[in-house]
Amino acid sequence: MIREVITYPNKLLRTKSKDVEKFDEELHTLLDDMYETMIDQNGVGLAAIQVAIPLNILIINLPNEEDIQDKEDLIEAINPVITHKDGEQVFTEGCLSVPGFSEDVTRAQHIIVEYFNRFGEKQTMECEGFLAVAWQHEMEHLEGHLFIENLSYLKRQKFEKEWKRKLKNKK
């Protein structure tokens, strides 16, 4: 089932998510819904808080060499923790909760993440490049942050002005 993606400035996006304690049918349904929602919105990642569920859950599905999002490459991460990060890279990021806006963000180049899969089995993943960016971006959501908070003061002011104008024109 496709769920509604909440967008900035919805206060829920500021919520710090809580750890999942039960790896059950309800969790599996949420993960399946998140996948359908992400694909429907043409996203490459989605945190549960973006569908208004404040739990430490995120999914990432980057396009492969053929530019296809293969479900076999889908990462479902529950209660993820970054245990190591180093290096630096700049990537132009966008977000389903801040539609139509993208900006350069500096993040770690290389990370190691520990998390649980949908069955509660512990996983470790080491990654760099775009995948490392996607992890860091989604994990910020779990802390109640958005990528726009990483922008310089001036870029942030410019964003807020454009965003308010956009919201006004929608009404």
Image: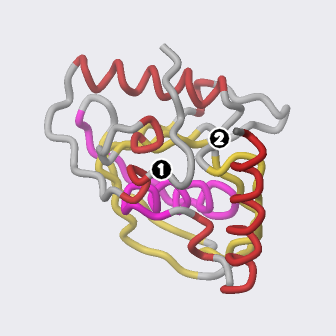
Q: Which residue is mark 1?
A: 10
- Give the camera-side residue of 125 and 137: 137
Q: Which residues are magenta?
A: 120-145
Q: Is residue 146 magenta?
A: no
Residue depicted at 38% across the width and 50% down the height:
12
Q: Residue furthest bottom?
A: 153
Three-letter amino acid code of the residue under disc 1: Asn
The crowding category of the residue bearing disc 2, from other C-alpha atoms within 10 Å (few below 14, some 14 to 19, many at least 20), is many
Q: Which residue is mark 2?
A: 44
- Give the camera-side residue of 159 and 150: 159
Q: Up-down: is 109 above or below 44?
A: below
Residue depicted at 52% across the width and 26% down the height:
35
**Alpha carbon separation for disc pair 2 and 1:** 21 Å
Q: Is residue 132 magenta?
A: yes
Residue depicted at 62% across the width and 67% down the height:
148
Expressed as whole percent of the image width and height from the top left, the position of residue 106 reads 67, 77
Question: Which disc is residue 78 wearing?
Answer: none
Q: Quadrant of residue 133?
A: bottom right
Q: Up-down: is 163 above or below 115?
A: below
- Secondary structure state at the residue bearing disc 1: loop
Three-letter amino acid code of the residue under disc 2: Val
Q: Residue furthest top?
A: 1
